[in-house]
Amino acid sequence: MKIKSTPSPNFDERTLPISLIVLHYTGMETGDAALDRMCDPAAKVSAHYMVREDGSICQLVDEDKRAWHAGVSEWAGETNINSASIGIEIVNGGHDWPAPDGSLPSYPDEQVMTVIGLCKDIMTRHGPLQLVGHSDIAPARKIDPGEHFPWYGLAAAGLGHMPASVNDRRILFGPGSRDRGVAIVQRGLAHIGYSARITGVMDKDTKLIIEAVQRRYRPDQIDGIIDVMTMSLIKSLAESS
Ligand SMILES: [Zn+2]
């Protein structure tokens, strides 16, 4: 795997063992713009790797150092995600830089294949790691790598789990619903790793976490409502985690 070194000054020391890989999109007009920003000491952001559209890789921070990519975030009760993770920025304009026809810009196959290869390569050094999107660990702030990221392609390559589900969109719990069933869903979300609190109410935070789940596992309908399909996805994910 050919990796170009483009060192960033934006890192410090890890205080936790590595347990996660966090995937991001750059969300900027070009890869070079993202690289410049991540190498600018004033920006105070970075990642371990950046993968360009053509599948080439830059390494900005050594894996044993703590890159600054996650921001305020939480997974499985841990809030120091930068210390516990390796961050990969994938060059893609995302929601701010749509394609000319207004759709979200697609991730080219070469790039996706490289992300898969890079994740597997990282795991040869650190053992099996959980794979999350920035939107999974910061559902109230972030929506990258976006509903257009091919999570199913990664799952087909053995990275992450894509549960089977019934295509049943009947609504169970919407905004403000107060029900034992909501608490059960929240428990399931927390068990998967999401920062869900068990309130039994479909509050704002729960809605945002449901959207994060849908963005990753049911990208054609992201509404933050618990329908039969969303409930079955969460149940299946919780059972396998
Ligand atoms: Zn991000």
Image (tube, grey):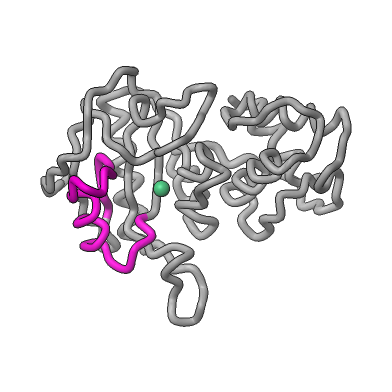
Camera-side residue of 163 and 131 = 131
For image coordinates 28% across by 44% down, the residue present is 45
Expressed as whole percent of the image width and height from the top left, the position of residue 199 reads 77, 28
Quadrant of the rendering where the N terminus is positioned: top left
Q: Which residues are magenta?
A: 26-51
Q: At which x and y percent is residue 68?
A: 30, 38
Query: Is residue 15 a member of the stretch shown in magenta?
Result: no
Residue with the most extreme bottom position: 101
**Left or right: 113 in relation to 41:** right
Q: Position of residue 203 (x, y in %)?
A: 75, 40
Residue 172 left/right relative to 74: right
Question: What percent of the width, then of the height, locates residue 30?
Answer: 28, 66
Quadrant of the image containing the C terminus: top right
Which residue appears at 52% of the width and 52% of the height?
A: 143
Say left or right for 15 vs 143: left
Along the viewing direction, whichever of 118 and 184 lies nearer the viewer: 184
Give the side of residue 128 with respect to residue 156, left or right: left
**Residue 55 position by quadrant:** bottom left
In the figure, 166 relative to 12: above or below?
A: below
**Total residue callouts:** 0
Q: Quadrant of residue 219?
A: bottom right
Residue drawn at (65%, 45%), measured in percent from left and top?
208
Q: Determine the residue positioned at 30% across, 18% down.
A: 15
Q: Residue 33 lies in magenta, yes or no?
A: yes
Residue 9: image quadrant is top left
Along the line of sight, the residue nearer the viewer: 169 or 120: 169
Q: Is residue 170 above or below residue 104?
A: above
